[in-house]
Image (spheres, coloured by chain):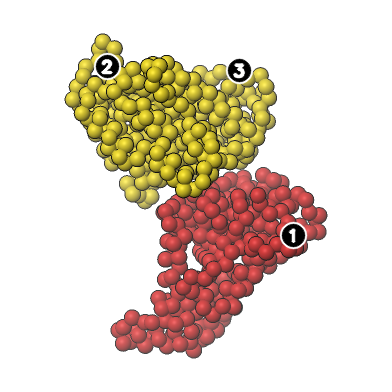
Chain colours: A yellow, B red
């Protein structure tokens, strides 16, 4: 373990020292990442009042001790820890991609995505150390102790590996898009420092998922990577993104809403009262619709005679919720055990697929369309 | 779906029992949160007695089924549906069961595989040692948030484990906290990696079984500490002397002392 528990942190500066050690430990010795000036950023609040839940209409809480229910304080800590864990995990997942960047533009985009994800983790630790006392210090330290590549991160998607640049674009398109949903829901939080943190984070996150969407469009337009491979990577990430919304009928989501900690994705535009038992499901449905729209948009770039990309069924390969550990095909049909094993092998990226994609990316330097006039093909 | 009250004909045990090389593994199994009912407490009681009477069992490991919960405590749905008199007897029986666990002269290790809150922590507090699975959940006594107190020994055992003021603060706020913080408080003795958690706990437990250790001595040390801490010092020292005398007459003490004198590794038999 990198950071021994004996080296306990007392201040945010101590934590920043450990953060630098973590960067080196996972191999982030690239100048773009080293030179980035990390800072905590807080944006303006939509309103000074809590907008939903049992404390609706009261002033947003500026300090944790103002949160009147201990369970809400505990849940708030948890929400911040989970968000922070995903930020550092994603950097660990992407840490080996620099060497294979197809263009200088893409290399810079990767550097920006990674630095901003680190900043988001930095921001969450700023909250933990600034507001949560001893428990916050322990959790902030632990965010730097877990490793995605040792399967220690708190959520399943963030223990998967990102293997190549097709994988990266798919990840940023679908997993970072899930991140946008989570950040948006937290932006409605009654705990003002958390809500304020989300404003700059959402702006930065939009670049990340834009990178994914743009990268996939450039790949599809170029037409060098077989669509079957692209679909397999969609099948790998989209079900894990569905899982990230949490269990169906979640009591944690119910309480988080009731306590005013985490709102609905469409809190400001949805005039209906929230169905507290279906909060995760309803966010997942909105995500599904958005993803489906983006995939249809990609399909419009594919010549008419070719097969099209599709969104895996919400029941496929799920590990959380009512469909967890059940055997459904990528199009949603129930399958017998043996058939299911064959199906998984056919629709998810296998070692042979990874080898083939990696070989394709290495052999054909023009597997992706250049990014505008300023793009320069390079061997980096 | 968790059991609220089990039908009379139920045959599925809510506490599963298995023995593995001198260790009895007791698993609370009522998904999703392994909450306990009167039926589960009866099963736990039976499992404790079974381990107590079995001469081949030297250590007891208590854990929860699944990866998410050790136990979330008493089943709140059950508490909401039964009359006050039933609740009283339910609490009394739970207390008696946990005292039986505490007084059994065999080491009891709680393997905290997931969230350990409310009555779940009260059960764990009646165990001698607590080993947690890394990042597997939260621990605490949040009963105050329901308008009640930790009524299965929590107010007494937590204060004895970590001191009055810290215990009181945790119980009146109802704060739940990480296993790491619990370790700093001395509430959890160690944290093991997530992968293969229970096998690691069993490896740890085997050191207290023969031939590695004289398990009767382990059990009497437990007895001296658990009972001795609750009586005046003079009586506690008397208890310690009597337990020592019992051990002096044991085969393992003879083996231990002889092996030391002969400079060889002792081979204990648990006798």
Query: Could you say which quadrant of the image residue A201 lies in?
Result: top left
Q: Would residue A187 be found to the left or right of residue B257 on screen? A: right
Specify the farthest residue to the left.
Answer: A379
Using a 10 Å C-alpha cutoff, classify the residue at mark 2 as few (fewer than 14 neighbours), some (14 to 19) or many (20 or more): some
Between the residue at mark 2 and the residue at mark 3, the CA separation in whole angstroms equals 38 Å
- Residue A318 numbered tag: none
Between the residue at mark 3 and the residue at mark 1, the CA separation in whole angstroms equals 49 Å
Q: Nearer the viewer, residue B142 or A320?
A: A320
Q: Nearer the viewer, residue A79 or B158?
A: A79
Chain for numbered disc 2? A
- The answer to whether residue B218 of the structure is visible from this angle is no
Using a 10 Å C-alpha cutoff, classify the residue at mark 1 as few (fewer than 14 neighbours), some (14 to 19) or many (20 or more): few
Residues behind callouts 3 and 1 on a single chain: no
Q: Nearer the viewer, residue B227 or B231?
A: B227
Asked if disc 2 and disc 3 are in contact, CB closer than 8 Å, the reply is no
Query: Could you say which quadrant of the image residue A41 lies in?
Result: top left
- Residue B7 numbered tag: 1
> Which residue does the image show at 31% across and 87% down from the upper left?
B262
- The answer to whether residue B76 of the structure is visible from this angle is yes
Q: Would residue B182 be found to the left or right of residue B173 on screen? A: left
Above or below: residue A198 compared with residue B52: above
> Which residue does the image show at 48% across and 39% down from the upper left?
A317
Query: Which type of secondary structure does the marked residue at label 1 adopt?
Result: loop
Residues behind callouts 1 and 2 on a single chain: no
Query: How far from the left and from the top, in percent, is residue A331?
Result: 50, 33
Query: Could you say which quadrant of the image residue A262 lies in?
Result: top right
> Which residue does the image show at 39% across and 19% down from the upper left?
A305
Chain for numbered disc 1? B
Query: Which type of secondary structure does the marked residue at label 3 adopt?
Result: loop
- Residue A370 numbered tag: 2
Which residue carries the number 3 mark? A269
């Amino acid at each position: 373990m990198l950071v021994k528990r004996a080296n306990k942190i007392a201040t945010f500066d101590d934590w920043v020292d450990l953060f630098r050690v973590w960067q080196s430990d996972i191999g982030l010795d690239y100048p773009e990442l080293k030179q980035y000036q990390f800072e905590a950023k807080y944006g303006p609040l939509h309103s000074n009042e809590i907008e939903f839940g049992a404390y609706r209409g009261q002033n947003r809480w500026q300090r944790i001790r103002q949160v009147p229910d201990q369970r809400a304080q505990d849940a708030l800590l948890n929400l911040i820890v989970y968000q922070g864990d995903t930020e550092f995990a994603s950097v660990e997942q992407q840490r080996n991609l620099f060497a294979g960047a197809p263009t200088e533009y893409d290399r810079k985009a990767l550097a920006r995505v990674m630095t901003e994800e680190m900043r988001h983790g930095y921001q969450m630790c700023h909250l933990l150390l600034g507001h949560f006392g001893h428990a916050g210090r322990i959790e902030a330290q632990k965010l730097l102790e877990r490793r995605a590549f040792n399967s220690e991160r708190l959520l399943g998607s963030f223990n998967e590996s990102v293997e190549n640049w097709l994988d990266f674009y798919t990840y940023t398109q679908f997993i970072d898009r899930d991140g946008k949903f989570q950040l948006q829901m937290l932006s409605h939080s009654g705990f003002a420092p958390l809500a304020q943190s989300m404003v700059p984070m959402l702006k930065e996150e939009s670049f990340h998922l834009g990178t994914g969407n743009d990268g996939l469009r450039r790949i599809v337009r170029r037409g060098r990577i077989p669509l079957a491979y692209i679909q397999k990577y969609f099948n790998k990430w989209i079900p894990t993104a569905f899982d990230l919304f949490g269990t169906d009928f979640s009591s944690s989501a119910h309480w988080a809403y009731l306590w005013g900690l985490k709102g609905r994705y469409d809190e400001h535009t949805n005039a209906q009262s929230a169905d507290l038992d279906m909060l995760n499901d309803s966010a997942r449905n909105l995500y599904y619709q958005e993803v489906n729209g983006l995939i249809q948009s990609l399909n419009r770039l594919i010549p008419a005679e070719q097969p099209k990309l599709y969104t895996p069924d919400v029941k496929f390969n799920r590990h959380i919720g009512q469909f967890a550990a059940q055997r459904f095909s990528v199009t949603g049909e129930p399958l017998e055990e043996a058939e299911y094993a064959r199906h998984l092998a056919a629709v998810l990226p296998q070692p042979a697929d990874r080898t083939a994609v990696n070989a394709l990316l290495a052999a054909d330097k023009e597997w992706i369309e250049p990014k505008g006039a300023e793009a320069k093909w390079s061997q980096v | 779906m968790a059991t609220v009250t089990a039908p009379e004909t139920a045959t599925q045990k809510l506490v599963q029992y298995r023995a593995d090389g001198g260790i009895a593994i007791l698993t609370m199994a009522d998904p999703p949160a392994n909450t306990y009912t009167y039926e589960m407490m009866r099963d736990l009681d039976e499992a404790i007695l079974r381990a107590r009477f079995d001469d081949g069992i030297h250590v007891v490991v208590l854990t929860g089924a699944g990866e998410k919960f050790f136990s979330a405590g008493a089943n709140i749905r059950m508490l909401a549906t039964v009359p006050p008199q039933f609740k009283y007897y339910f609490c009394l029986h739970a207390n008696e069961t946990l005292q039986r666990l505490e007084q059994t002269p065999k080491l009891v290790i709680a393997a905290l595989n997931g969230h350990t809150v409310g009555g779940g922590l009260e059960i764990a507090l009646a165990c001698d040692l607590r080993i947690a699975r890394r990042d597997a959940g939260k621990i605490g006594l949040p009963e105050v948030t329901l308008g009640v107190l930790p009524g299965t020994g929590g107010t007494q055992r937590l204060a004895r484990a970590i001191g009055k003021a810290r215990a009181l603060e945790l119980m009146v706020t109802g704060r739940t906290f990480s296993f790491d913080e619990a370790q700093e408080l001395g509430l959890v003795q160690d944290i093991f990696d997530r992968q293969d958690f229970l096998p690691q706990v069993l490896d740890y437990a085997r050191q207290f079984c023969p031939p590695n250790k004289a398990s009767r001595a382990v059990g009497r040390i437990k007895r001296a500490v658990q009972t001795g801490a609750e009586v005046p010092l003079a009586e506690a020292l008397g208890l310690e002397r009597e337990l020592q005398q019992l051990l002096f007459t044991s085969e393992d003490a003879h083996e231990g002392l002889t092996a030391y004198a002969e400079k060889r590794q002792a081979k204990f038999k648990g006798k």
